[in-house]
Image (cartoon, rainbow, N blue to C red):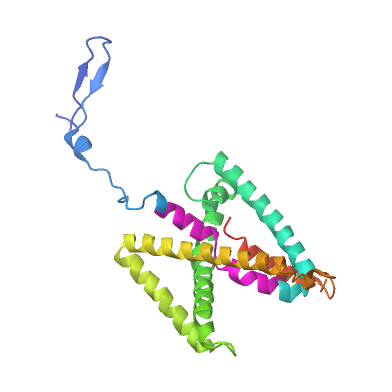
Amino acid sequence: MKSRYTKTSQNRDPHTGSSMKHASPMECDTPKVELKKRINLFHCVSIIVGVIIGAGIFVAPVGITMQVRSVGMSILMWFVVGVFSTLCALCFAELGACLPESGGEYIYIKRAWGDFPAFLCMWMNYLLIIPVTGATSSLVFATYILKPAFPDCDPPREAIQLLAALVVALIVGINCHNVNWVTKLQAVMTGSKLLSLLMVVGIGFFWLGTGNTENFTNSFEGTDFSAGAIAFAFYSGSWAFGGW
């Protein structure tokens, strides 16, 4: 009775005498499935810098100062949060060097505690962290856009929410339509962030250079040392340093 299975054809190597298997035409002609590479180095740098410089840097300074109620304590909180974020970034850098795989914290949690905790981490990111971050960034953008139109009062809450929703819908539409448009928009937004930060730093140094240093006289006067104020200030600073 003939077997239902066919044998793989083999030839002998004339030099070594070992058998050589011939690959089937399907194995040779199967195309490799991969994403189209449409992002160049400049666009990659723009995206990474845009992720590092988030909306928190434009909001956190006010939040920290409002919580601790003094300039000196605010600067101290920035230093403490900066050291903490640097240590966290170094830990992730060491993990990335030990586990050079794509996936970020998912890979690290999976290796340490298994599939289920890693699964929960990813769903928490997709359902909570990423949507909240996007919503917050859009609200900050809408607030800064509408503020010049209301110089004597805060912009209406409904107007801020409506503009923020339109911004999110516009970005989603651009992402769905053409990735090249997204990279160009990201480059523009990253340039705007860098220019804004340079303006803030430049104006600050100019203000100090003209002798306006009264805020640094008794800079710790009136500081709120309560645990709640310190915790909220630390959280606000962590948001600004979240780009690591």
14 lies above or below 114:
above
14 lies above or below 36:
above
Q: Report the residue at 80% width, 70% height from top.
A: 227
Q: Main secondary structure of the magenta part?
A: helix
Residue 186 placement: quadrant: bottom left
Q: Report the residue at 42% width, 76% height from top.
A: 167
Which residue reaches farthest left? Answer: 1
Residue 117 locus on image (x, y percent) = 56, 56
The residue closer to the viewer here, 117 or 168, is 168
Residue range in magenta is 43-64
Q: Report the residue at 78% width, 67% height from top.
A: 73
Q: Report the residue at 45% width, 56% height from top.
A: 46
The residue closer to the viewer here, 55 or 211, is 211
Residue 193 visible to an observer of this rendering = yes
Magenta span contains residue 46? yes
The residue closer to the viewer here, 205 or 126, is 205
Residue 228 visible to an observer of this rendering = no
Residue 60 placement: quadrant: bottom right
Q: Is residue 122 left or right of residue 12?
A: right
Residue 19 locus on image (x, y percent) = 25, 17
Residue 175 placement: quadrant: bottom left
In the rendered image, which quarter contains the N terminus?
Answer: top left
